[in-house]
Image (cartoon, grey):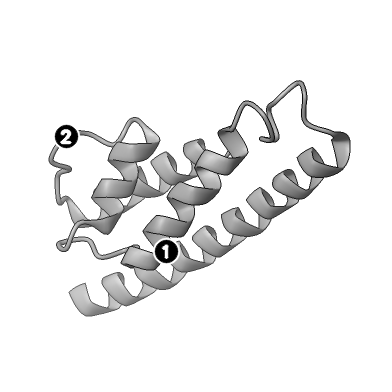
Amino acid sequence: FTEKLVVSIAGRIYEETKLAPADGIEKMGKARNYLRDSRINFLSEKQNDFLGSFYGLASDEQIGAHSLTSDREHARIIKNEGIELGLFLVKLLDKYLKENLESNN
């Protein structure tokens, strides 16, 4: 969920700004690099670090939400945190697009 959302946000920002990514946006790492790019400036350094850390935790084979060995409670918490992170990113995108569209008009 998180990777698809980040890739989608990068794609949407590309559509609006027409600022081409240096090496694509089809994977999480590349999309995060694009969103962190100084021309785009969508994610702060701390937001980018948090997103990377959360993605790593959620993907961890031992404790991540997709792990077959994680307990249900842990998987539920990771899933809910992912939903909240997704909401944060969507709100951030909404704010970014409003500010970007206003400055271009």
Give the number of callouts. 2
Q: Amino acid at mark 2?
A: Asp
- The C terminus is located in which quarter? bottom left
Give the residue drawn at x 33%, y 67%: 44
Between marks 2 and 1, how big is the CA–CA gap? 21 Å
Q: Is residue 2 visible?
A: no
Residue at image x 39%, y 37%? 28
Write down the residue under mark 1: 47
Relative height, residue 15 to residue 75 (above, below): below
Which sits in the foreground, 73 or 30? 73
Q: In which quarter of the view is residue 42 placed? A: bottom left
Looking at the image, residue 32 lies above or below residue 102: above
Residue at horizontal 16 percent and vertical 63 percent from the top: 38
The answer to whether residue 22 is above or below residue 84 is: above
- Residue at the spot x=33%, y=76% of the render? 99
Check disc 1: other Cα within 10 Å, few if <14, some if 14-19, many if 20+: some
* The N terminus - image quarter: top right
- Which of the pair 38/100 is nearer the observer? 38
Q: Secondary structure at mark 1?
A: helix
Viewer-side residue, 91 vs 100: 91
Task: Tell me the residue that label 2 is attached to.
Answer: 23
- Dot 1 amino acid type: Gln
Front disc: 2 or 1: 1
Identify the secondary structure beneath mark 2: loop
